[in-house]
Amino acid sequence: MDRPRWTRPEAGMHTVRTKKMFKVQQQAEGNLLYSAYPTITLIRHRCKDKVAVYLGKNVFLTLDNFGSSLLPLRIPRSMAVQKAEVTCAHFSTDVIILFVVDGKIFIYNYKDKTWNQASGVHHTVSHVSGDTCCFKGSSFCLEITNKLFAYFRGDQLANTVVYFSTNGGFSFQILVDERQRHLTGTVEGIFHFHSLSQIGVFTFRNQSAVFIYSDHPLNRSWGQFFEQHEQLDIIQSPGQRGFLIFWNQTSLFVSPNVGQFVDTVQLQEGQTIVLDSLTNNNITIHSIALNENELGVLTREDHLYYGSQGYLRTVVIQLMEQPFWSEDTAIMFESPGMLEVLIPVPDTEFLAFDFRKCTVNIQAVLMDPSLQMKPCNVELLEGPLEKEMYTIDMNSKLDLSAQIIPRPRESPVPLVMVSNPHSLGVQASMVEFGTTFDGNSKYKLEIQLKQQHLLGRADGNFTTISMKRNAISALTVDIADKEISCVDLKPLSTLISIGCDLKKKITVQNKISACAMGILDPVDLQGNYSYIIEKWWNGLMHEIVDAEYVLMEVNGLFTYSYSLTAATAGCKSQPQNWTTVLAATDNSEFKSWDRENYVSCHEWSEDRPLLWPDVQYQILGGRTNNRVIFDQRNGIYVFSLSVVDPHYSYCHLDTVFSVFVYGALPLPLFPPELVILLLTTTMLLSVGLVYTTPKLLATERGHHFKRFWSRLCRGCIWYCSCPWLQRNFQRWLQTRRVKFQREAKQQSEATGQMETERSTDTLQLSGTKRHTDTKGYTDIQEWPQTQTKPRRRSSDHHVPTPP
């Protein structure tokens, strides 16, 4: 049954005790999980404020911020763990938490309360590391969350088997890196620092610790060495800003830039820094709490420290002393400025644990005059950066702004930072644009972001090795000299993706559109077509594409060619074409020609010398004026267009459009030049005869010419009217006719003898009669005969006629 909460007003604490009706036998099945370390770790879900895991002598999972009593978490016996010792816990996807128990990785779905073991891990591991991105509606953010590493902490770096996952920990693969064999030291942590687009390996060597990075330019120079003799737990602050917390019971370090620079946490009293390192105060750290910008530390000496994570320095102050500490005490930030102390309390009657909670209002505590805290020097810091993610495509820029209102007679120093300056450059300026009702000045911080390669202010060795490599960076706007009392004034931060902007697409627009203009004039239709390729952003025209692109007719029609060859296009090496691109694939699947496999021919290459300069150059756009030439064919072409220029956009820009070819006349049988020559000659001769013939007929030769043609015509007429000729012509015609009839009769008798047996009353026969004239010539003529067939009597024997 539910029991009411009770509080101790003198201590400011209350105990949560609810929902105690459990099926004890069912809930008690399995092995009881416990932490492998003496310190207490409380891990909150980055994207769900009320979901958290408590790691101590017992392991608790809460879905309501420890607002009710909980049973300790158990792992089923079917998982076959020798000891239920937890070395790491990590929130993965929406309802999944990964536990490393007894050297194995287990997946716990806290919605369905089911356990499974991750596949692909065949070596003992101790830790899983990853980051959680909470920006909504972004596949890029989900990709950040799904990338994980698994490893055994303490192994020699050269021999460590490192696993990685791209699906949130459901399956892992071995990460093979040849450079790993040449490194010395022990592995203390492997992280994917998305805010820097680097993989960082934290290692110990010669009693010092250092980060080693994977990619240019950080792989040339490691992070800062700092002295350390014991293993350190590493916590990444939420928000992908690059803040790291290194700690154990005797050490505490911070880094604002993922380990490139590591500093201590300073202790402040009033307005004075009394210790450069908090751990020099003879304390033993028991629990750490942090959010995007706040830091809390609880020690075994019952000291509670509070501070803010700063880019220039991190300072903490000691709050009031109260008996908070116990072996099971943990601290966490319930919300900005609200620090909560949590102690699990076992129940004598039930297996479930109650939770004693004490909430510390930091803002109220800092108003205590004994702490001598200065008031916050900034009243307002706001901008469109929170809970928003931005993308900068290649050759693009991004303009953002923030508003700052300082306290009267204060002049705070704004701080605009990018976590990955090797890829993302920033320019900022601040202008005053009015006052508030109270007379305070308002300032606008104008921020312009652009790729560092294109900003033109950084040395070439400082930038990434190629601008074709997409990257990520965090943008943070903060106050450099912000007081600790600015509890509610957290920095503005967002993620910037230097990559493909999914809002952009390309489309093909024709200058002459039949859809827009109706029926076009035939002269226009027979003219040259030209197309404009436009890039769109949010449905609006952004720019005209002048990058290199390729075409492929999707229906397999190749009745077109290109106007340029490799030589006329100015190629210095052999250009690619569709034949070479498709032949480069290893399987039968279609491999597209895009920005990833495109190689320019305008740069010399020893591997691709220009051996065939007369081949067609199949790349359009860019620096050449290459065109498509259609053959004499009317019809519709459907083209797939793909932008292949690797320096134009990070996106795979492609589209499909059609071209209607109309008015293509048939090819002439004779060359047009010959036809024109013959027509001209005929016309000239005709005109000449019209003028010369009458004159020639009037001469003596003309009279002889007329008499010749007159005799020739009379002879032809007499010959045609000759009786002998007429009789021979008729006889030849009759002979041909009889021959044809005989052939038809023989064919009819051979193919259908039974046709003569049909029940008909009369049969149509044919015969011939021969006539001989007085000159002995025989004339064969057709004559019909009709023979009547007698009717069959009923008494006659009947033979069935075949059908």
Image (cartoon, rainbow, N blue to C red):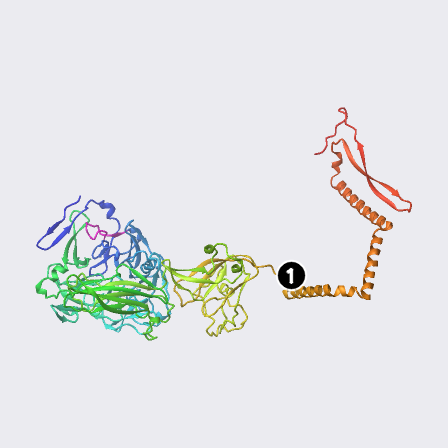
Q: Could you tell whether 208 is left or right of 348 in the image?
A: right
Q: Residue tagged by mark 1?
A: 669
Q: Can the viewer see residue 272 in this picture?
A: yes
In the figure, 727 relative to 198: above or below? above
On the rendered image, what quadrant is the N terminus found in? Answer: top left
- Identity of the residue drawn at 18% across and 58% down: 330
Residue 289 spot, x, y in % from top left? 20, 61
Magenta-highlighted residues: 61-75
Query: In the image, is residue 132 part of the stretch drawn in magenta?
Result: no
- Closer-to-camera residue (482/92): 482
Q: Position of residue 474 (x, y in %)?
A: 28, 65
What kind of residue is marked 1?
Answer: Leu
Give how far across and how far down residue 792 sits, in percent: 77, 27
Helix, strand or loop: magenta stretch: loop
Mark 1 Cα within 10 Å, few/some/many (few <14, many 20+)? few
Residue 745 falls left or right of residue 632: right
The answer to which image quadrant residue 598 occupies is bottom left
Vertical relation: 61 (above or below) 149: above
Residue most extreme to the top: 795
Residue 72 inside the magenta-drawn segment: yes
- SS at badge 1: loop
Q: In this view, does 636 lie above or below 776?
A: below
Residue 258 in sight from this viewpoint: no
- Residue 802 in percent (x, y) is at 71, 34
Residue at (76, 42) in percent of width and height? 750
